[in-house]
Image: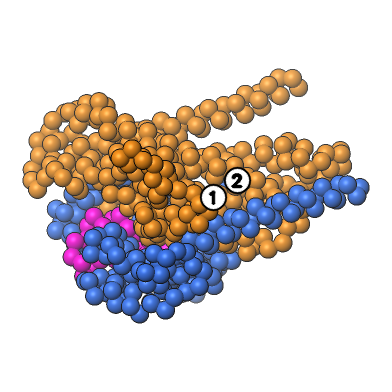
Chain colours: A blue, B orange
Amino acid sequence: MISSTNALNVKRFFVYLFMLFLVLLAIVPIYLLLINATRSTAQINDGISLIPGHNMAYNWHALTSRGFQIQQGFFNSLYLAVTTTIVTVYFSALTAYGLHIYNFKGRKLLWGIILVIMMLPASLSFIGFYQFVSRLHLLNSYIPLIIPAIAAANTVLFLRQYLSSVLSMELIDAARIDGAGEIRTFNTIIFPIITPALAAQAIFSFVASWNNFFTPFVLISSTKKYTLPMLVQMLRGDIYRTEYGGIYLGIAVSLVPILIFYSFMSRFIISGITMGGVKE
Amino acid sequence: MKQKTIGNETRVNRWGYFFVLPFVLAFVLFNLYPTIYTFVIAFTDLKGLRNTFTFVGLKNFAKLVSDKYFWGAVENTFVMWGWNFIPQLGIALLLSIWLSDIRLKLKCKGFFRAVIYMPNLLTAASVAMLFRSLFAYPIGPVNQFLQSLDIYAEVERNGTMIREAFQFFRSVPASRGIVAFIQWWMWYGNTVIMLMAGITSISASLYESAVVDGANSRQTTWHITLPMLRPMMLYILVTSMIGGMQMLEVPFLLTDMRGAPDFKIRTTNVYLYNMAFQGVNDYAYAAAISIGVFIITIVLALFIFFFLQDRSELKKKRVGVTK
């Protein structure tokens, strides 16, 4: 009995050691990024440090004085993330509700299509998408980044599953008897009920848009409309070659908002990962 | 009377079209039509700044099949995905079993999960730029760390051996390893959470009756947890493979946007970008590449499903026969 508890303690010790290693592996790159963002080029050349320097103001200047419009980029990213999130969440809720409540012709077909879209690789439609957008003369516009967000298959899938677990037909019937129209029923009764599920989906859709690099990178050409990841990508260029601190600071600006957000919402986000997708 | 109520019901059900209309419109315009258009373009010679094209039949696909750069990109994608996926599933399995082990009674589980999942939410483009800086030559933090441990690369220059910093992005295994590491770093936390959800959904009575029969924790792991997790692992394998075939930002931004060193970290999607949006803008060939990748992905996904599912189906049948 004693030997088995001892063996368990030894195992526990090594498991904790391994967990500590993994925690360090997750944190150290980010920590080095934040520290180096505050240090001067000379300090960074000197070696690794765990203590922040006080060159952040200089690094900020070095970064922004070379046409690196980081505030502009920040607000562009924010604008896109907020609009696509609103569009995705509202229209996905609309679609999920329509699929769940009404028994119309083609409902099964549409549901099948939604399941198929989720498995299709994103690159398949990309060349056609680019050519189509180019023919519409919508290159360098945010419209092709926002409007496609109406059709977010995975959000619809998640919300429909949620609806089937929380929504009772009696509630809708009661609203109908009280004379509420179908749209009003949705906007004033259903929408508030599914807010918790919408919040989880809103977070994922916000993060996805914030992190989206490739589509804007291909479509947007004027630097005024650049998003943060596109700006960060510019740091590869020669003009920043010796401004190591500035490069780290530029990368940090795109990551810190997510880190702050995550530190408050991590519990909610993690419980949201498994709520939707995998039920098979 | 009865007919009238049916009429009412259909009328109410018509509202369904109104509710799904925005989704259908956006889907048809920006997803379905572009997909079909991609297939059309793949059979044309659409290239450069021209707007017009003529159909050239299977020319692009013939070129694709014999394009060693395309197959090189396919190989790169699979190698880097494999180097990331095998440790990802292995470590995630270990962690999820440990974290849900009642006898181990680990503390700080929530904190641990939150920390290891964190990289998954970070901007992949920025993560690539971060690791590009961390592994930089000659004075990136990784080189500085190795030098503090007195580890140097030994390079022969003019007949004498010189100790200097590692040029990680000139070495094929190192570059591929860094890409695989970043993918692993960003995704294993997600896999841990999925597997833990899978373990939680295994009925507790299975474990209870096994313990009553005298099974130890290793036996319950091998004979209950792992077999019951099989569908979840299959799901993770397929989604990770589909996602891995789409690997783009990290190998794109880590080196020169063309998969240096020697095109060896160029994934299929980076190759697609190189063809369509750099140099000659060969959209038709890029469309053929995306279709080629799609076909490879589908074939592999079906292969995985049939190969891994058939065996369990067979087992079930065998059990049925012995009954």
Q: Which quadrant of the figure has residue A274? A: bottom right
Q: Is residue B294 visible?
A: no
Who is closer to the viewer here, B295 or A164?
A: B295
Q: Main secondary structure of the magenta part?
A: helix
Kindly check if marks 2 and 1 are in contact, taking CB atoms under 8 A apart as contact: yes
Q: Is residue B80 visible?
A: yes
Q: Which quadrant of the figure has residue B13? A: bottom left
Q: Could you tell me residue B311's position as x and y percent? A: 60, 26
* Sooner in the amino-acid sequence: mark 2 or mark 1: 2
Q: CA distance from mark 2 to mark 1?
A: 8 Å
Residue positioned 33% across, 78% down in the render: A58
Residue positioned 33% across, 74% down in the render: A59
Q: Is residue B173 left or right of residue B317?
A: left
Q: Is residue B105 left or right of residue A138?
A: right
Q: Say which quadrant the C terminus of chain B sits in.
A: top right
Q: Chain of mark 1?
A: B
Report the number of numbered marks: 2
Q: Chain of mark 2?
A: B
Q: Is residue A89 above or below residue B84?
A: below
Task: Determine the secondary structure under disc 1.
Answer: helix
Q: Identify which amino acid the numbered label 1 is placed on.
A: Tyr
Point out the stretch of residues depicted in magenta: A206-228
Please rate how many residues cluster around mark 1, counting C-alpha atoms within 10 Å: few if below 14, some from 14 to 19, many from 20: many
Residue positioned 27% across, 62% down in the render: A241
Q: Could you tell me residue B39's position as x and y percent? A: 24, 38
Magenta-span inclusion, residue A211: yes
Q: From the image, tell me which residue sits under label 2.
A: B91
Who is closer to the viewer here, A62 or A205?
A: A62
Q: Is residue B9 left or right of residue B92?
A: left
Q: From the image, tell me which residue sits under label 1.
A: B188
